[in-house]
Image (cartoon, helix red, strand yellow):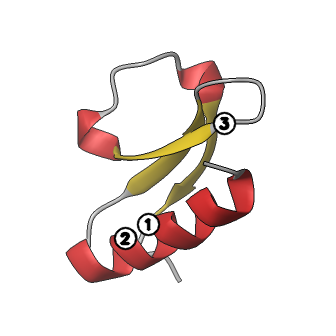
Amino acid sequence: MPLDTAQDHAWDLAQTLMVCIIVHQVGDQTFAVTESSDFDGDVETVVREYDPYAA
């Protein structure tokens, strides 16, 4: 999905589930949203992490 869409979904998901969510790049212009505890890919592909407990 595009970055803007991924970021919107990631923030909503983090707030709903109250878990850390990351947005990571999976292609040239393609991004995915994954729960941080489930991510086992390359950390250099991580674009942003959303923590629902952060101020």
Amino acid type at mark 1: Asp
Marks 2,1: beta carbons within 8 A: yes
Q: Quadrant of residue 45?
A: top right
Q: Which residue is the extreme one toward the front?
A: 1
* 45 lies above or below 2: above
Please name the residue that numbered disc 3 is placed on: 30
Residue at 58% across, 26% down: 26
Which residue carries the number 1 mark? 51
Other-residue count near label 2 (Cα within 10 Å), few / some / many at <14 / 14–19 / ≥20: many
Amino acid type, label 2: Ala
Examine the rendering and report whether any part of residue 53 can be seen: no
In front here: 9 or 42?
9
Residue shown at 44%/66% (left/top)?
51
Question: Relative to the observer, which residue lies in front, 1 or 35?
Answer: 1
Marks 3/2: CA–CA distance: 20 Å
Whole-percent x, y for residue 8 in the image: 58, 72
